[in-house]
Image (tube, coloured by chain):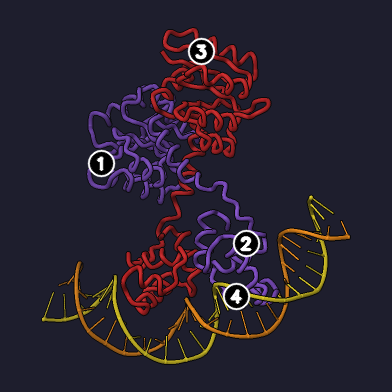
Chain colours: A red, B purple, C yellow, D orange
Amino acid sequence: MINVAIVEDNHTIREGLAALINGTNDYKCIGTFYDCESFLKNLDKMNPDVVLMDIALPGMNGIEGIKMAVEKKPELNVLMLTVHEESDKVFDALCAGACGYLVKKTPPFRLLEAIKEVSEGGSPMSSRIARQVINAFKDVKATAEEEEYNLSSREKEVLNLLAVGNNYQEIANDLFISVDTVRHHIRNIYKKLHVHSGSEAVAKAIRKKLI
Amino acid sequence: MINVAIVEDNHTIREGLAALINGTNDYKCIGTFYDCESFLKNLDKMNPDVVLMDIALPGMNGIEGIKMAVEKKPELNVLMLTVHEESDKVFDALCAGACGYLVKKTPPFRLLEAIKEVSEGGSPMSSRIARQVINAFKDVKATAEEEEYNLSSREKEVLNLLAVGNNYQEIANDLFISVDTVRHHIRNIYKKLHVHSGSEAVAKAIRKKLI
DNA sequence: AATAAAACCGCATAAACGTGCGGTTGCTTA
DNA sequence: TAAGCAACCGCACGTTTATGCGGTTTTATT
């Protein structure tokens, strides 16, 4: 038996969802709320396995709502329900702690499936939303690529120490080598990265994810 | 009509998939391959809307396979099919250009749905896999937070110029101000960021997403 | 056995940097 | 209207950096 709470301002949709859920044997709706405030107030007294949450709500919006809710109960499984597919909202919701993200036009049987998946540690997403997440993911993961500067591990070490504010002498002490060797490493780093100052080297290294 | 190509080394599964697809009116299997090499060789001669690709393959693996394939046809929609849910493979595949990611135990009707979704620009994912993606996504997106260093826009400007390799004099020329003013700005930047060198300042600024 | 690459060391010097002190102007905000 | 801040300018001075040259040793690859 999966206990579900619903946060949705539209009366018809809210009752429709509740009816859908209560019309099954495996799911039970243990609370319906028309805004986040009332949901949060009652969160202490109940233990939903899954929360269905609308994004657009009067007063506190769904994103803020999730944040507050997971602060109270970090293990909470929140499934966003929305009419929008705009990236910003999607990302904000996911970062705030949403576990899944469905568009409202999702067919009832699929919604029930999704609730089950969420309660079992999955993250069902409407597929167009998933595409957005994947693209964003690729953006951040990407970049690393191709351009290989072949910094040796020693050089990366030196560069790291430089990036946290050490001067040559301090780096030398940290690595038990002489300042001249530090100088030598830095020289090579500059050559490999095609730069001419510590600041530039550090900037490039961080942006290319070398350090 | 959606044209599908299949890359899968296991004979039974491969023919099963082909039969499933050809057993419908809306889908057609236009090619089956037991490895990436033969698939890539034939890619010029065909135009699949969706490619079903196994990850574990003899010879070139599925990840490499995607990379080569999207190099040839960047608009290709590749749907990974796998028994594994290990994060590394998932991320590698997505970065390589996969559009979706399903476990092999996905029921047939759901697989057909997924193929359709992929061809329409969606990214169906098995929900446990989606959870992994979301978690990874949260990790990278996070960090940004809170700590406000209140750099003025002028200071950010200076910091940016420093990060791309300019020395004080060059920054001064770029901004039509004197070197002493540059010095002054940098001084304040150091104070605000609690650092004592250009390298450290640039590193901190980039990592905190200030520039 | 030989070549290459990484890591190490040294010296010299001009240029750049970091930080101390002092100041003015103009805009916003209490 | 006084206080605060951003942006501007100046000078001085010791420290650090960037880059030129020269080298050795160790480890891996051929």
| Residue B61 can be seen, yes or no | yes
Q: Amino acid at mark 4?
A: Tyr
Q: Which mark is residue B74?
A: none
Q: Residues within 10 Å of mark 2 (few under 14, many from 20)?
A: some
> What is the chain letter for disc 4?
B
Spatial distance from mark 1 to mark 3, Cα to Cα?
46 Å
Nearer mark to the viewer, of 1 and 3: 3
User: Which residue lies under the disc numbered 3?
Assistant: A29
Spatial distance from mark 2 to mark 1, Cα to Cα?
50 Å
Spatial distance from mark 3 to mark 4, Cα to Cα?
65 Å
Q: Is residue A63 above or below residue D11?
A: above
> What is the chain letter for disc 1?
B
Residue A179, given in percent of the width and then of the height, sits at 37, 77
User: Which residue lies under the disc numbered 1?
Assistant: B57
User: Which residue lies under the disc numbered 2?
Assistant: B156
Are the residues flagged by discs 4 and 2 in contact, CB closer than 8 Å?
no
Task: Say what secondary structure mark 2 lies in.
Answer: helix
* Front-lying residue, B25 or A18: A18
Q: Quadrant of the C terminus of chain B?
A: bottom right
Q: Which mark is residue B168?
A: 4
